Image (tube, rainbow, N blue to C red):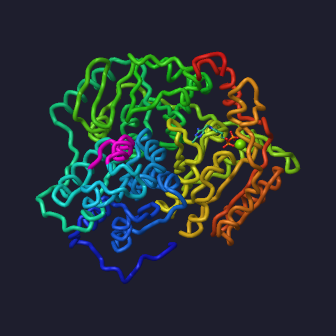
Amino acid sequence: MGEKKNDNAAPSTGKATSVIDYIVQRLADEGITDCFGVPGDYAFPVCDAVDRNPNIRWVGCSNELNASYAADGYARVRGAAMLSTTYAVGELSAINGVMGAKAERSLVYHVVGMPSYQNQRVNRKLHHTFGDGVFGNFVNISAQAACCHAVIDPDNCMIEMERVISEARRNNQPAYIVVPGDYALAPVTPTEVRPVTLKSNEASLGKAVAAIAERVRGAKSIVAFPAFALARLRLQKEAQQAIEALGCPFATTTMEKCIIDESHPQFAGLYAGAVSAEKTRQTVEDAELVLDLGGISLNDETTAGFSGRLDSARFVSIGLNDVCIGEQVFGNVRLADVLAALAKFKSPAVPYRRTPEQSRRVNGKPADKITMDPLYSRYAGFIRPGDNVVLESGSSSLGLPPMTLADDVRVHIQMLWGSIGWATGAAFGIALADPNRRTILITGEGSHQLTANEIGNMGRYGANPIILVLNNDGYMVERALEPYPDWSYNDLAKWRYADLPRALGCADWITARVETIGELDAAMKAARESKSGAYIEVIGGRMDMPKALAFAHTRIKELYGSDAA
Ligand SMILES: Cc1ncc(C[n+]2csc(CCOP(=O)(O)OP(=O)(O)O)c2C)c(N)n1
Ligand SMILES: [Mg+2]
């Protein structure tokens, strides 16, 4: 789909002799077929190597922040992504997005081209620097956004690539790879290397599994939390098998929405502290043992301002590389191996069976203005098996999650890092990563303003998302989180959102601006039927908020640590 590669370029597979050809091919070997980025002169060797590599295509983005979000989204679907930016000005613009990928365990390889070694050696005053002849000013900053980094030269290239790849995979977090332009074009020094396979230490694994078994046997009630990292590592099936073997209920936080089908008989519901359904709250908070599969994040957002009662002493935490039970730590055990062992457990207890309970659907009448209850009910009904749903931070990320969604739906949300604008960029990466699923972006208009220019590239590369933009005249979530909603800083420029696709080059997209339920229904139907992208601007009330947001308004102290928010 979309733009073609330059067919005249020499393929590099199998004979990657230059440093940069080697780097690009090594990342292609990780299953990456797209490189998101913005070119720049110091990065030309990287861009050229991508363009001439037959296994990976260049995907141009409107700016580096968008590119980093797109790469994050792509990595969430494919397991890993490549991001290419230029020295200083490019990489620094990408940092927020790469930091977010680090926070939420998304494996982005951030490859940056830097000034040549020749120029570095003689301290040249170059563009994209402070003019001080110093070239290490930004490496440390970009490295902070990654779990590991390497400054590449021809001699270390092959060894460093294996090191950063294995470290990045071990943590499922970004790696930063920076290469001076002349070194990039130099021949790589052949070195004997072997890709590292991440295996458990057998003895440690045995002890960890025995310790878990003992806790499981001794517990009268267990609840499992399949964590978001499972989706990043694509271990959802394995987690489900473990949960089925244990026969216990499982709950999810919003970060794991739909990680296992919500129709599963052992699904106990969405846990969000005091705003959980009462039965879900009891199942979770009264359980004697909480089995954390992959490292859940019980932060202020997932617990509705720490309104839950979850005692950490009851946790058995199975991380990516270790198992923690109270003070006991079993290192060097892999999540996949522990899940495989759990899947062989035989629970003596009668398996938990939830009494099915559908979330309440509110219909509204066709002539009614659009309000939040019927809006999210409609979204929930609209989302089908096979959809990729990308949810932006803001009122949307509180409105949709309480609704039960269809099976085989993947929900993507950046709840911990919570950088607005993420969802629009990520939707681009997700749509390219997974063209067989329809990508549905649900965003507020304020967030969308940060990254809306990426729509142009969605059209350019043939993505066909359905974009639902709630226009409620400003930053409503912020209005709700303050005693005084009308501060001028929560107002926005009044864009004509539905005109954006046309202005940005997506002339064949379906667009609509809807104010009533009837108009919304008609627009959603047309969007679903269209082969091209679709963009719907939904006009909402200025202070019409989902219930969870109204609740948050009562917890300002817990959220911000003082009464005066
Ligand atoms: C990069 C970044 N800047 C600022 C914020 C603070 N912030 C959080 S939500 C929000 C407003 C979201 O408004 P909108 O997208 O219109 O959604 P609404 O709540 O109005 O539906 C802002 C400014 C943030 N989270 N991230
Ligand atoms: Mg808004």
Q: Horizontally, is 189 left or right of 535 in the view?
A: left
The C terminus lies in which quarter of the figure? top right
**9 vs 433, nearest the viewer:** 9
> Would residue 378 be seen by someone viewing this image from the given angle?
yes
Q: Horizontally, is 209 left or right of 463 in the view?
A: left
Q: Where ligand 1 lies, by quadrant? A: top right
- Percent from the top left, x then y, of residue 475? 70, 39
> Would residue 230 be seen by someone viewing this image from the given angle?
no
Magenta segment boundaries in residue numbering? 136-150
Query: Toward which corner of the image does residue 328 lie, by quadrant?
Result: top left
- Percent from the top left, x then y, of residue 131? 39, 51
- Percent from the top left, x then y, of residue 415? 53, 38
Query: Toward which corner of the image does residue 155 lie, by quadrant?
Result: bottom left
Q: Horizontally, is 321 left or right of 101 in the view?
A: left
- Percent from the top left, x then y, of residue 493? 75, 48
**355 vs 150, nearest the viewer:** 150
Q: Does the magenta stretch include residue 178?
A: no
